[in-house]
Amino acid sequence: MTALAPWLQTQLTCLLQQRGHALLLAGPPGLGQYPLALALARGWLCERPSAQGACGQCGACHAVDVRTHPDLFVLMPETLSLELGWPLDEKTQDKIDKKELKPSKFIRVDATRQAVAFSQFTRSRGDTKVVLIYPAERLNTEAANTLLKTLEEPAGALRFVIATEAAHALLPTIRSRCQTHELHWPDTAQALAWLQATAAADPALATQRPSTADLQTWLRAAGGRPDEALDWLRLGPAPGLWSRLPRAIAAGDWSALSGWTAARQMDVLQKLCHDLMVRQAGAEPRFFAAPDLPPAPALAVLVAWQRELQAAARTLEHPYSAALMQEAWASAAQRALALH
């Protein structure tokens, strides 16, 4: 298993000292909820744990790493399970293979019932059983309600680690049954050091040798989230592209974004709109350097554009023509940014 980032390792060491049966790891996207939750589950299940977590060498650690530990139940959307290599139950997998069922982006109530049934089984290996839920905001109301009794009165030595990127979207009855841990933001020096080391160890990035200035640029583009900054590095944009984007978009030049996914294009537009809004309010932008921004239009214009972007973001996965969608976004951006 890949070593945890240092700011996550510090939090893991503290969390392992807690004795509650249900921990809620909460924070905005990109702070490492899933790797921290998995490291916590590994630490609880490890046969030779230390104060820093799992040993990484015992049979229990190996079983978690190969997704076969009988005392660990991972509850997540089917799309994410498939992406991260967690096996689905045979019935669901068979239906997906036969194209009878489309993998869900939400946590189905049937899977939640399986987690409840798992909680009632006898332990197979050690002293603890663990249910890991991520991202918990993908539980619908019925699925969340199915968990409540087990979460309040767990059978035997059962522990929950519940990770979310939108704690406000969870039922209050879920939150009230957990000890909440707010994930910490890494400081800039920590994040840059981690990015430098990770990029150097990544075969796809080792030949790029990004400079410190490049790392700072992409860390800023990611809003201070190192994992997202690493994604930008792997995308491999040309040096200096990020600084040119705001004025290019304002001028209607979409060429730099045309090869990116719709989700990434929308991310850029929302970040640009955010920075112009805070700039108009007299604050410092978060994602772009202030000199790189075009003149900010009136706040009312930006608010209207923000609403357009929010509406468009909700349709990202609809089967619209990508070219027409991009044309509409480019036109809306140019129109908004020309009214200053």
Image (spheres, helix red, strand yellow):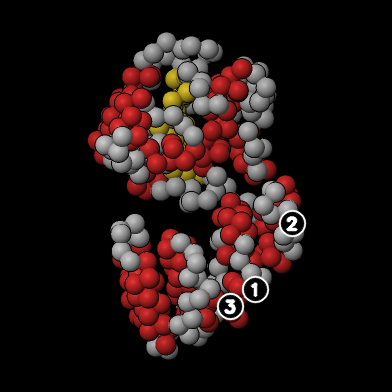
Q: Residue at x 38, y 84 (%)?
A: 335
Q: Observer-nearest residue: 16 or 133? A: 133
Amino acid bearing label 3: Arg
Q: Secondary structure at mark 2?
A: loop
Q: Is residue 116 left or right of residue 2?
A: left
Q: Observer-nearest residue: 27 or 107? A: 107
Asked if residue 67 can be seen in this view, the reply is yes
Asked if residue 144 can be seen in this view, the reply is no
* Cα distance in 3D space between marks 3 and 1: 7 Å
In the rendered image, which residue does mark 1 sit on?
240
* Cα distance in 3D space between marks 3 and 2: 24 Å
Amino acid bearing label 1: Gly
Q: x, y percentage for residue 19?
A: 52, 24
In this view, 294 is above or below 107: below
In this view, 127 is above or below 185: above
Res. 244 mark: 3
| CB under 8 Å between discs 3 and 2 | no
Q: Earlier in the sequence, mark 3 or mark 2?
A: 2
Q: Residue at x 61, y 39 (%)?
A: 11
